[in-house]
């Protein structure tokens, strides 16, 4: 097929970012180039594209956009879609793409040996590439960490009017609730959501960084947030602010039980991929230790491959036990999680 610059860039509000090379109108060959639709918005990912091209000679073209927009676009393009790979964040969004029939199963010894079983789709439709721990963060001057224990405990009366939490519209909170459904069941999860709502000191507003700021300012004692958001306040990072960073403690819940909740970003090969072989090769590259190190250092995420060095700030938070539930369940449970949060009055 031919891929024109106009056809690749004509997606409403979507923005195309060219990595390594401009888009070519030449006929795609098996090794020549791959087209990535990505909702990851981290500039450091460009290092991955550049390194992959240096190693393989395969050119990388990227189209950036909202995950739902990209999924819809691939559906509308049908079998004429130029997309080889869809990359996105959060297991629920990977599930949405899966439900839309976008992915094609991949059998790869490299991916299966590198990425733990609970971090990939059981049928190889998609693979996790980074991990995000959603943990309890607390004001060091107002909370003794000995008070903290589990996610479940955060919904008890002792935390009444002591918490700030992001909206239920946030997919990270939805996936946390989905993990609770998998671990403690629907009824207990709904009671947990109701307890969280009672413990909020204010209605949900803002993102994870806003919750962290509120806790640092003393508006609340605790919140739930992804670890990489706190890392952004560390010295030398994008939003460096020691007045915030130094006041916040990180607590990994459920360490005497199932472990802390872990979400992911990941990707899969589009079923109509013009360059399937190149797409699989790219996913295998992303699971290599050098690429995993770029992921880890670039956005302070956790690598999915063991023994890859962490961002130094993330490493300071310490080691922790992870919940081993297969992340595909987070997506499968998403519709029920949304219903439960709505019934509980979590806005």
Image (cartoon, grey):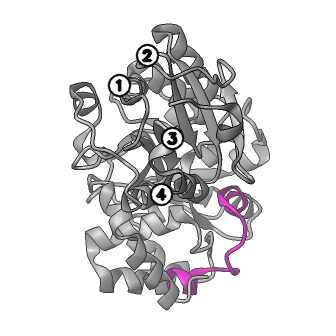
Residue 183 in percent (x, y) is at 27, 68
- Image quadrant of residue 142? bottom right
Q: CA distance from mark 1 to mark 2?
A: 8 Å
Q: CA distance from mark 4 to mark 1?
A: 24 Å
Residue placed under numbered mark 3 in the picture: 317
In the figure, 238 relative to 254: above or below? Answer: above
Lateral position of residue 162 relative to residue 240, left or right: left
Secondary element at tag 2: loop
Residue placed under numbered mark 4 in the picture: 93
Residue placed under numbered mark 2 in the picture: 31
Q: Earlier in the sequence, mark 3 or mark 2?
A: 2
Residue 213 vs residue 72, the one in the foreground? 72
Residue placed under numbered mark 1 in the picture: 277
Q: CA distance from mark 3 to mark 4?
A: 27 Å
Q: CA distance from mark 2 to mark 4?
A: 29 Å
Q: Residue at x 50, y 33 (%)?
A: 315
Residue 80 vs residue 64, the one in the foreground? 80
Secondary element at tag 1: helix
Magenta highlight range: 195-212
Q: Earlier in the sequence, mark 4 or mark 1?
A: 4
Number of residues whose C-alpha sits closer than 10 Å to that of mark 1, classed few (under 14), some (14–19) or many (20 or more): some
Q: Earlier in the sequence, mark 1 or mark 2?
A: 2
Number of residues whose C-alpha sits closer than 10 Å to that of mark 3, classed few (under 14), some (14–19) or many (20 or more): some
Residue 172 in percent (x, y) is at 52, 61
Q: CA distance from mark 3 to mark 2?
A: 42 Å
Secondary element at tag 4: helix
Q: Residue at x 48, y 54 (%)?
A: 90
Q: Is residue 208 magenta?
A: yes
Lateral position of residue 161 relative to residue 179, left or right: right
Q: Nearer the viewer, mark 3 or mark 4?
A: 4
């Amino acid at each position: 097929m031919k891929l024109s610059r106009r056809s690749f860039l004509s997606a409403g509000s979507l923005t195309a970012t060219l990595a390594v090379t401009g888009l070519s109108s030449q006929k795609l060959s098996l090794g020549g180039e791959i087209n990535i639709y990505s909702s990851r918005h981290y500039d450091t990912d460009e290092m991955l594209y550049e390194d992959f091209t240096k190693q393989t000679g395969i050119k990388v073209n990227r189209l950036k956009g909202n995950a739902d927009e990209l999924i819809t676009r691939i559906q509308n393009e049908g079998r004429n879609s130029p997309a080889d790979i869809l990359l996105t964040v959060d297991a629920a969004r990977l599930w949405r793409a899966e439900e839309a029939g976008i992915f094609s199963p991949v059998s790869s010894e490299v991916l299966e040996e590198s990425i733990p079983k609970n971090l990939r789709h059981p049928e190889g439709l998609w693979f996790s590439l980074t991990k995000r721990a959603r943990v309890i963060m607390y004001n060091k001057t107002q909370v003794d960490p000995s008070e903290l224990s589990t996610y479940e405990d955060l919904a008890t009366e002792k935390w009444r009017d002591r918490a700030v939490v992001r909206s239920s519209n946030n997919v990270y909170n939805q996936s946390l609730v989905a993990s609770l459904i998998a671990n403690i069941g629907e009824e207990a999860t709904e009671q947990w959501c109701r307890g969280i709502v009672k413990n909020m000191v204010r209605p949900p507003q803002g993102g994870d960084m806003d919750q962290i700021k509120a806790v640092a300012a003393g508006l609340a004692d605790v919140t739930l947030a992804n670890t990489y958001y706190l890392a952004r306040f560390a010295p030398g990072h994008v939003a460096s602010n020691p007045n915030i960073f130094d006041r916040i403690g990180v607590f990994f819940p459920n360490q005497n039980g199932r472990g802390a909740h872990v979400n992911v970003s990941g990707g899969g090969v589009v079923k109509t991929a013009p360059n399937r072989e190149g797409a699989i090769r790219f996913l295998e590259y992303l699971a290599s230790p050098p690429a995993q190190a770029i992921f880890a250092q670039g956005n302070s995420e956790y690598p999915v491959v063991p023994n890859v060095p962490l961002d130094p700030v993330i490493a300071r938070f310490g080691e922790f036990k992870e919940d081993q539930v297969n992340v595909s369940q987070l997506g499968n449970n998403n519709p029920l999680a949304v219903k439960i949060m709505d019934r509980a009055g979590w806005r």
